[in-house]
Image: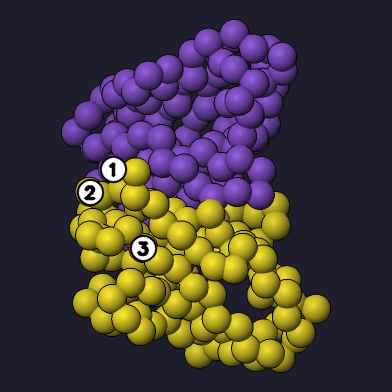
């Protein structure tokens, strides 16, 4: 069964450094998402992406964050100048259609630790 | 309550018993979806129920939706130790794209 994959599974970085989290969505899906989950808290929406542009973003997704689909398979989340409070699990998801009625399939997540 | 808020926050039952988790939401929805998360892992989609549906089954899972009360329930029958996980309901607001997740119910099934 097709699945969303994410790399790395765990990323440790120093405060102020830039990190890139990578995702490979399910191949025939057109909509891509990033969510994050701070330890012990709710899963929070960051951004959705369709047709090579951001379609929706939350207040969390400020200028520190950016997303890109550099080729036909990868979808990346870049965090510039990381802060301690960026430590969280970051989940990528994809769906065939916009979520008016469609299921989002989640990857296993990348655990980001900012020291 | 918040959009997509589950209760109870934690539930502990014996293997073989049924587990019922509830979700309440505040605004109109197109559908409501339930996800499971094993500790430290990703979210696994369980079931989707549309706003015009009242009940849906999938294996040992039964989901109900009451749009008049803005609530949904997830029933797991004949629970197993492997069902131990956190369960989240997720809603999409008014044709938007992003999921709003509740804080989840932590289910522990004791052997």
Labels 3, 2: one chain: yes
Query: Could you say which disc has been placed on residue A2 in the image?
Result: none
- List x then y, in percent, for residue B76: 49, 19
Give the color scheme: rainbow, by chain, secondary structure or one colour. by chain
Name which of mark 3 and mark 2 comes first in the sequence: 3
Pick out the residue farthest to the right.
Answer: A115
Q: Quadrant of the C terminus of chain A?
A: bottom right
Q: Are marks 3 and 1 on the same chain?
A: no
Q: Give yes or no for contact between labels 1 and 2 (Cβ–Cβ under 8 Å).
A: yes
Q: Estimate how packed mark 2 is, as few (under 14), some (14 to 19) or many (20 or more) residues with alpha carbons within 10 Å.
A: some
User: Subunit of mark 2?
Assistant: A
Q: Secondary structure at mark 2?
A: loop
Q: CA distance from mark 1 to mark 2?
A: 7 Å
- In the figure, the purple chain has which letter? B
In the image: residue A18, left or right of residue B1: right
Residue B4 screen position, x and y as percent: 46, 45
In the figure, B79 relative to B107: above or below?
A: above
Task: Please indicate whether residue B102 sits to the left or right of residue A14 in the image.
Answer: left
Q: Quadrant of residue A20?
A: bottom right
Q: Is residue B64 above or below residue A110?
A: above
Q: Marks 3 and 2: which is nearer the front?
A: 3
Residue at position x 59%, y 9% in the image: B17
**Residue B85 x/y as whole percent:** 61, 34
- Disc assigned to residue A101: 2
The quadrant the N terminus of chain A occupies is top left
Q: Chain of mark 3?
A: A
Q: Secondary structure at mark 3?
A: loop
Task: Tell me the tag on residue B31.
Answer: 1
Classify B22 as above or below A79. above
How far apart marks 3 and 1 lie (CA) works out to: 22 Å
Q: Which chain is yellow?
A: A
**Residue that badge 3 annotates:** A25
């Amino acid at each position: 069964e097709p699945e969303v994959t994410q790399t790395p599974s765990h990323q440790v970085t120093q405060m102020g450094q830039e990190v890139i989290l990578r995702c490979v969505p399910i191949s025939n899906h057109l909509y891509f998402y990033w969510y994050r989950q701070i330890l012990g808290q709710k899963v929070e929406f960051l951004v959705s992406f369709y047709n090579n542009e951001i379609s929706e973003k939350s207040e969390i997704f400020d200028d520190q964050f950016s997303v890109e689909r550099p080729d036909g398979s990868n979808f990346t989340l870049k965090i510039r100048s990381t802060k301690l409070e960026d430590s969280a699990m970051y989940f990528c998801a994809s769906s065939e259609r916009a979520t008016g009625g469609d299921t989002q399939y989640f990857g296993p997540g990348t655990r980001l630790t900012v020291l | 309550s918040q959009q997509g808020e589950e209760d109870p926050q934690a539930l502990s039952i014996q293997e073989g018993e049924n587990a019922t988790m509830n979700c309440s939401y505040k605004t109109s929805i197109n559908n409501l979806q339930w996800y499971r998360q094993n500790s430290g892992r990703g979210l696994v989609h369980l079931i989707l129920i549309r706003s015009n549906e009242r009940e849906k089954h999938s294996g040992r899972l039964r989901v109900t939706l009451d749009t008049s009360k803005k609530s949904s329930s997830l029933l797991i029958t004949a629970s197993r130790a492997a069902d131990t996980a956190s369960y989240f309901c997720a809603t999409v607001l008014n044709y938007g794209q992003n999921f709003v997740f509740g804080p989840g119910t932590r289910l522990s099934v004791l052997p």
